[in-house]
Image (spheres, grey):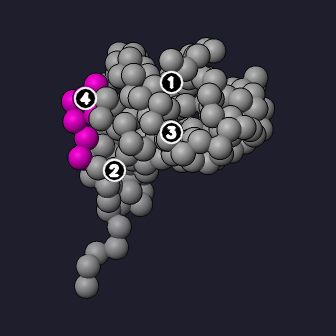
Amino acid sequence: MVDVRKIIFIREVITADEMGSACETITRVAAIAVLRNPFAGVDQTDLSHLSEVSAKLGETLTQDLVRMLSGPPVCYGKAALIGSSGVMEHGAAVLHPSLGKPVRAAIGGGKALMPSNHKVGPLGGCIDLPLGHKDEPWSFDHIDTMTLCVPDAPRTDEIVLCIGLSDGTRAHPRVGKGPSAS
C-alpha cells in the first residue's frame, strides 16, 4: 500500500464573478491526497500499483466531496503533481486507468471524458485541475479550472493527487455551446 501523508479538502463557494456581480451560488470542491511515490527514482515499467491506489482513494475521497457540495455534482476533473524524482508517467498511472470509475460511481454517472492534467513540479508547485461537465463534453459554459497547491508538497518522492467536483458553471458564463455548424 502507498503511504498517504495527508489529505486536504477545499470547498469554494462562489457568489459573485470577478467583477463583483452577484451570480447563482456555485460550489467547487477538491480533495488533495499527498502520497509517497514508490517508483520515485526507480525505472519501473509496471505502474499498476499506482492505479490500484488511486482507485481506492477515488472511491473514498469522492464520497466526501459529494457531501461537501451544495447541489448535485455537475462537473468533474482530476490532476496530479509529481515530485522531481518521479516522471510524468507516474501521474498518468494515478489518473487514467482506474480513477474515473470510482468517481463516476460516487457521483451517479458521467458520460463525458473526465478532464485531467499532470506534470512534474517543485515543492509547493501549483497544478491546474480542469473541470468539465460530467455528461456534456461540448458544454463550454462548464469548462473551468481550480488552481491548487500544497505548500509542503510534493516532496521529491511524492505525488499530489487531486479530484475536483462542481455543482454549476462558471459565474455568468457567456461563451455558449460553441460555433454553430454550417
In the rendered structure, find residue 47 and report the number of the disc placed on it.
3
State the CA–CA distance, disc 1 to disc 3: 22 Å
Residue ID for mark 2: 113
Q: Position of residue 28 (x, y in %)?
A: 46, 30
Residue linked to disc 4: 105
Residue 131 position within the rendered picture, expressed as x and y whole percent measured from the top left? 44, 44
Q: Say if the magenta span includes residue 90.
A: no
**How crowded is the residue under tag 2: few (<14 C-alpha within 10 Å), some, or many (20+)?**
some
Q: Quadrant of residue 104?
A: top left
The structure residue drawn at horizontal position 35% and vertical position 67%, both measured from the top left corner, is 178
Residue 31 disc label: 1
Asked if labels 4 and 1 touch by Cβ distance under 8 angstroms, the answer is no
Q: Look at the image and give the residue range highlighted in magenta.
A: 104-111
Q: Is residue 105 magenta?
A: yes
Asked whether 35 or 69 is in front, the reply is 35
2 and 3 marks in contact (CB < 8 Å): no
The numbered mark, 1 or 3, whose residue comes first in the sequence reads 1
Q: Is residue 127 visible?
A: no
Three-letter code, disc 2 = Leu
